[in-house]
């Protein structure tokens, strides 16, 4: 299964969700490939991997997703192991920032990532794609390649602002480029039970998305914010934290929902 983690707003927990959902699925025996499709490369650095801006490779010899999209390298050449068994990474770097322009003249540019994944020889249970906070050609590539979309939505004021455009983009890709694409669900993030607005937003989201709202809720948790700076996933950094418990339960919900 290929899952896009998507919201055109920044700071809603996309990367945190991609890393920790992937890590918990891997911990539970699933083979997981994380693809960092964001030029900010936070998923890559959050796993303790550094890929320099040199478009060919970094000092460790790592290629990046840029080389797949622009240079035609295969994913088999690019993916690398992480410190967690069963969890693998296709890294990103700042070179990806120019890919939107460079892809303009590429033939079937919306299909490049999908074609690369179709040729990927490594077996996997899940591919999870962390997207940039925009609805440009990189995100379209992700949606065309994916089976499902998870939308992290922060429990803060204006949380639903722009969601209609996001859903419209998903529907547009489904209608014209990927008829198999489906919204897996909306994940409530940064929930703070001490703040009334969190409960209000959570209720509004559940009313709007109904059964497409995940039961799991990710709390506002300082440990989730700290872990990436140490290049660790949450259960490596603090397995007793509320954030770790929340992503553990979320991974169970995904596994239960899709019978894996």
Image (cartoon, rainbow, N blue to C red):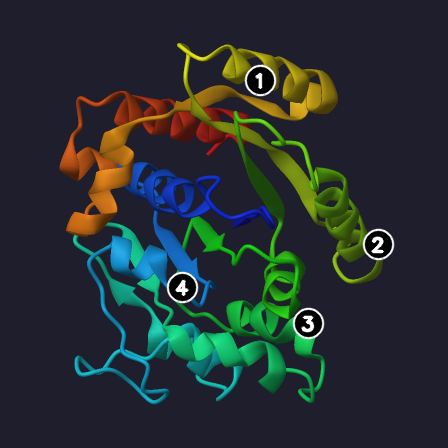
Q: Would you name the residue on which mark 4 appears?
A: 40
Q: Would you name the residue on which mark 3 appears?
A: 110
- How packed is label 4: few (under 14 Cα within 10 Å), some, or many (20 or more)? some
Choose the circle earlier in sequence order: 1 or 2.
2
CA–CA distance in space, label 1 to label 3:
34 Å
CA–CA distance in space, label 1 to label 4:
29 Å
Q: Would you name the residue on which mark 1 appears?
A: 202
- How packed is label 3: few (under 14 Cα within 10 Å), some, or many (20 or more)? many
Choose the circle earlier in sequence order: 1 or 3.
3
Q: Comparing marks 3 and 4, which lies closer to the viewer?
A: 4
Residue 63 coordinates in the image, percent (x, y)? 32, 80
Q: Are marks 3 and 2 in contact (CB under 8 Å)?
A: no
CA–CA distance in space, label 1 to label 2:
29 Å
Q: Are marks 4 and 2 in contact (CB under 8 Å)?
A: no
Residue 70 coordinates in the image, percent (x, y)? 52, 85
Residue 253 coordinates in the image, percent (x, y)? 46, 24
Q: Comparing marks 1 and 2, which lies closer to the viewer?
A: 1
Residue 175, label in figure? 2
Choose the circle earlier in sequence order: 3 or 2.
3
Q: Comparing marks 1 and 3, which lies closer to the viewer?
A: 1
Choose the circle earlier in sequence order: 4 or 2.
4
Residue 260, label in figure? none
One can see residue 135 in this view: yes
Q: Comparing marks 4 and 2, which lies closer to the viewer?
A: 4
Against 107, is 83 above or below?
above
């Amino acid at each position: 299964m290929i899952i896009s983690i998507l919201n055109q707003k920044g700071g809603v927990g996309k990367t945190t969700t991609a890393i920790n959902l992937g890590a918990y699925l891997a911990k539970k025996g699933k083979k997981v490939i994380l693809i960092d499709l964001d030029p900010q490369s936070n998923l890559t650095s959050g796993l303790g991997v550094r890929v320099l801006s040199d478009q060919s490779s970094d000092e460790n010899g790592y290629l990046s997703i840029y080389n797949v999209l622009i240079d035609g390298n295969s994913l088999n050449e690019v993916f690398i192991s992480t410190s967690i068994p069963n969890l693998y990474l296709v890294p990103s770097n700042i070179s990806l920032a120019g890919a939107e322009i460079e892809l303009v003249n590429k033939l079937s540019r919306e299909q490049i990532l999908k074609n690369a994944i179709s040729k990927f020889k490594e077996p996997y249970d899940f591919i999870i794609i962390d997207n940039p906070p925009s609805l440009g050609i990189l995100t379209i590539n992700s949606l065309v390649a994916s089976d499902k979309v998870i939308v992290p939505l922060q429990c803060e004021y204006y949380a639903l602002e722009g969601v209609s455009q996001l859903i419209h983009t998903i529907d547009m890709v489904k209608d014209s480029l990927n008829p198999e694409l489906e919204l897996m669900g909306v994940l409530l993030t940064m929930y703070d039970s001490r703040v009334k607005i969190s409960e209000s937003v959570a209720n509004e989201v559940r009313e709007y998305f109904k059964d497409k709202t995940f039961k799991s809720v990710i709390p506002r948790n300082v440990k989730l914010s700290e872990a990436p700076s140490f290049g660790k996933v949450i259960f490596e950094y603090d397995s007793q934290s509320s954030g770790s418990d929340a992503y553990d339960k979320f991974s169970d919900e995904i596994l239960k929902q899709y019978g894996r």
